[in-house]
Image (cartoon, rainbow, N blue to C red):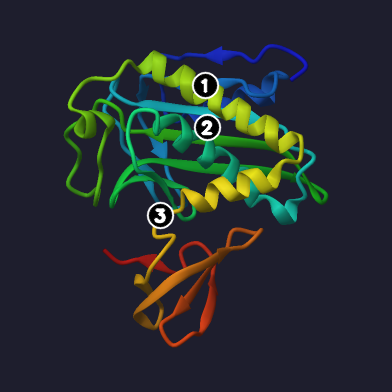
Amino acid sequence: MDSIPEIIQPESTSSTSLHLKELLKQQNLPECSVVITNRQTAGRGQPGNTWEAEPGKNLTFSIVFFPEMVPASSQFIISKTVAVAIVTSLEKYIRPVEIKWPNDIYYNDQKLGGILIENALQGSSISQTIAGIGININQTSFPENIPNPISMKMITGYNMNLQTLFHQVYQSLTSSYQKLTENKTREIEKSYLSHLYRRSGFHKYRDSHGEFLASISGIGHAGHIFLTRTDGITAKYAFKEVEFVF
């Protein structure tokens, strides 16, 4: 990083990712700059999903990268880089912290956090990435429409210091991203797979044809998941083409 990243802290914003996007249109922010807020009123998850967080009790922030060294065809490595950074920082406090494909953060069978990666392409390269991150920290009551939430407080039994946690996660993010800039992708890939939720054994999944048992046999460079069924047949799925059955 050529200049010192900025940490921008609005008390409230509809979405930290949208806030950061607007700032980047107006000024040249240094790489790894962050927008973090105590109150996000319209947080977004993966396409079609929202992210609900109780004000002042969770980590909701977005960070910008300029990963021009990453080919557009391999853009999922950025998602892996961010996910690995988060799980390795949180597992100082709790285990097991895992990555549910493509990039949810899980504790056992419950969702602890989520990541939304938005890449801007320029030719065959990536000119800009905004990673929106939400982690449940001290919230203990969630809306009924959220299927399987959990928070750090629900796991540990005590309140966590949000500022301390943010700085630890942020440090892990910048360290993980530094590995990406140094082309240490094998190290990132290895850590992603070792933290992958359901990385061993057969589990239930559902596609357009119905439910089936399968094991994860790999994750492609473009982010596809490869599932091998009990009959030995392997199929490739993009996000939203297959769902995990609990």
Question: Crowding near pointer 1: few (<14 within 10 Å), some, many (20+)?
Answer: many
Locate the N terminus and report the quarter of the image it occupies.
top right
- Residue drawn at x 39%, y 49% is 49
What residue did someone put label 1 on? Answer: 35
Q: Secondary structure at mark 1?
A: strand
Q: What amino acid is found at the position of numbered circle 2 in the picture?
A: Ser
Mark nearer the N terminus (1 vs 3): 1
Which residue is under mark 3? 197
Q: Is residue 157 found left or right of 10 in the rendered image?
A: left
- For the residue pair 138 and 11, the one nearer the viewer reads as 138
The image position of residue 184, as x and y in percent, is 72, 41
Whether residues under marks 1 and 3 lie with C-beta atoms below 8 angstroms apart, the answer is: no
Question: Along the polypeptide, which appears first: circle 2 or circle 3?
Answer: 2
Residue type (three-letter) at the residue carrying disc 3? Tyr
The amino acid pointed to by label 1 is: Val
Contact between labelled residues 2 and 1, with CB atoms less than 8 Å apart:
yes
Q: Position of residue 181 (x, y in %)?
A: 74, 34
Residue at 52 percent across and 32 percent down: it is: 17
Tell me the distance, in whole angstroms, between the alpha carbons under discs 1 and 3.
29 Å
Residue at 52% x, 23% y: name it. Answer: 170
Nearest to the eye among marks 1 and 3: give it: 3
Label 3: how many residues lie within 10 Å, few (<14), some (14-19) or many (20+)?
many
- Furthest-right residue in this view: 123
Tag 2 residue = 17
Foreground mark, 2 or 3, reads 3
Q: Nearer the viewer, residue 188 or 126?
A: 188
